[in-house]
Amino acid sequence: MWITLWIVWKTEGDFLRTISYGRQFIDDEDISAVVETLKSDYLTQGPMVEAFEKDLCEYCGCKYAVAFSNGTAALHGAYFASGIKAGEEFITTPITFAASANAGLYLGATPVFCDIDENSYNIDVDRIFDFITEKTRVVTPVSYGGNLVGLQKIYGDLSKRGIVVIHDAAHALGAKKDGFDIVDFCDMAMVSFHPVKHITTGEGGAILTNNEYFFEKLKLFRNHGITKDSDKMKFCSEPWYYEMWELGYNYRITDIQCALGKSQLKKADKFLKRRNEIADIYYSEFGKSDKFKVISGYKDEKSVNSFHLYPVLLSDTDERKKFFEYMRQNNIWVQVHYIPLHLMPYYRSNFGFKEGDFPKAEDFYSREVSIPMFPSISDSEIQYVIDTMKKF
């Protein structure tokens, strides 16, 4: 969720692009799909939105999908659909982008953080129940970097308690674990279509669900809380009539964006394959390194790490800043994911969080740097990244 900066750099007489940690891939098929929609009768609120949602359902194996203007708006909708309100609590991980928790704050709910598992970098699912109180309404696990969080271990018990599980799968489109998809073992799952994600609509996101009640709530929330379904009208059924049932927002995505997303989704499996190839190359080079801790992909055909990010953990925390600056000086635009949310000034001042509250998350942050991971990176660029890391 960072804006990608592009400059030109020169080495040994050749002009090459700066290598960012992530980048979109757009081809002529994508461009043609957008142009065709631009020439159509509908630029927004037209047939392309529903067509894209249908394709998402087929790809992700769920009954319903509701596309939003961005992933944060989608999460806002999911929290709304859950029924959470002021005075209630939600549990999430401190290692995530701000939206995972901010969307709950929009409805007046109180954030509760649970530390991460040091191996998966996801929320420690075995500890979630330590933080549940009578006020807990929602649990929002995040599949960090594309490594699917172990929701099957907790979903049944959470459901029995009436707790809604919102899977923040912004990093995990296409991910699987032990044959399970991102929509399994949760009530709603959010996917993001920001340019550095697996597919892009420019900006965009969606909520996936198998629950019709949540589906209807999400559609209302996206469109000002308004319905035009004459079969559901409470007071009138005139042809021009509509009713506002909820205090919703204008979070609609456009047909232009959905045309791009529909075209991009056709390439999603190819993108995933390439991301795993890149991860294998990195792991083969640094899997036994004393300086860098890196991760490997799954070798089980029923499991897929979708590798939105490729996190590298430095063994020496004092060298993280030096490594970050060294890579950028060599035109490799690495990034850090993420500053723990509980250390953000807003969360410190409003909720009393402080350093030391979540030691595993803080240790992870002190050592993590995300290196380039995107399908269009060339083999020569990958080798340049590897050589630069080795020189460091």
Image (cartoon, rainbow, N blue to C red):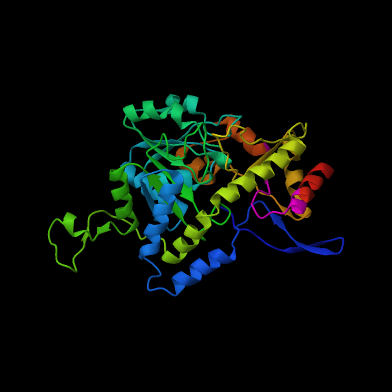
Residue 51 image position (x, y, % from top left): 39, 58
On-image quarter of the C terminus: top right
Q: Residue at x 75, y 53 (%)?
A: 381
Q: Residue at x 48, y 37 (%)?
A: 352
Q: Which residues are magenta?
A: 367-382
Is residue 381 in the magenta section? Answer: yes
Please determine whether, in this image, residue 98 is positioned above or below residue 241.
Answer: above
Please determine whether, in this image, residue 251 is positioned above or below residue 167.
Answer: below
Outermost residue, right direction? 12
Residue 124 image position (x, y, % from top left): 52, 29
Please determine whether, in this image, residue 156 is positioned above or below residue 26.
Answer: above
In front: 227, or 31? 31
In front: 83, or 208? 208
Is residue 388 in the magenta section? Answer: no
Q: How many marks?
A: 0
Residue 225 image position (x, y, % from top left): 28, 56
Q: Residue 256 appears in which quarter of the rendering?
A: bottom left
Residue 212 image position (x, y, % from top left): 29, 44
Q: Is residue 275 left or right of residue 241?
A: right
Outermost residue, left direction? 235
Can the viewer see residue 105 in this picture? no
Q: Residue 391 appears in which quarter of the rendering?
A: top right
Q: Residue at x 18, y 59 (%)?
A: 230
Please determine whether, in this image, residue 25 is positioned above or below residue 183.
Answer: below
